[in-house]
Amino acid sequence: MNLVSFGKAGESLAAAFLEKNGYWISERNYRCRAGEIDLIAEKDHVLHFIEVKTRSSDRYGSPAEAVTETKQQHLRKAAATYLKERKPEEDFYSFDVIEISLRHLKGVM
């Protein structure tokens, strides 16, 4: 599995998890000049801008640690563009990270 399909698989797992927990996915892979937002979801009148990080090991830290300050700046700018373009009804916004760790733990039992 290449890195792109690995990341897309993680995004699909994250979307299914959110939907199971009552979120409505309004957008996947929103792209603009400022960057990309993996998932945009709504629940209880809050709009969630979600970065999904999928890892097969923690060799370089947790998945959330990969959301650097630079990445956060791009997400904020992309979210501002989204809000300006789409003018959603929600008054509250949240920036979230979903970590997906796909690991094979051998010989643990």
Image: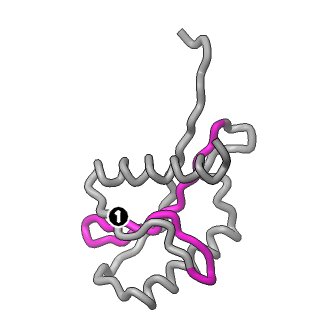
Please state the horizontal and vertical placement of residue 30, each as a whole percent of the image: 50, 73
Horizontal relation, residue 107 to residue 22: left or right = right
Horizontal relation, residue 47 to residue 22: left or right = right
- Name the residue at 48% across, 61% down: 96
Viewer-closest of 49 and 16: 16
- Name the residue at 56% across, 36% down: 102
How busy is the neighbourhood of tag 1: few (under 14 within 10 Å), some, or many (20 plus)? Answer: some
Name which residue type carries label 1.
Answer: Ile
Please state the horizontal and vertical placement of residue 78, each as a whole percent of the image: 55, 79
Q: Is residue 7 magenta?
A: no
Please state the horizontal and vertical placement of residue 21, each as a whole percent of the image: 29, 50
- Name the residue at 74% across, 38% down: 59
Please state the horizontal and vertical placement of residue 83, each as a whole percent of the image: 43, 85
Viewer-closest of 52 and 64: 52
In magenta, the rendered stretch is 32-56
Q: Is residue 108 above or below residue 27?
A: above
Viewer-closest of 6 and 97: 6
- What secondary structure predominates along the stretch shown in magenta? strand
Q: Is residue 68 above or below residue 58?
A: below
Q: How many marks?
A: 1
Horizontal relation, residue 16 to residue 57: left or right = left
Coloured how?
Answer: one colour
Mark 1 secondary-structure assignment: strand
Q: Quadrant of residue 103?
A: top right
Q: Is residue 14 above or below residue 91?
A: above
- Name the residue at 45% across, 51% down: 12
As drawn, which residue projects farthest toward the right?
A: 60
Which quadrant is home to the N terminus?
Answer: top right
- Residue occupied by mark 1: 25
Q: Is residue 59 above or below residue 86?
A: above
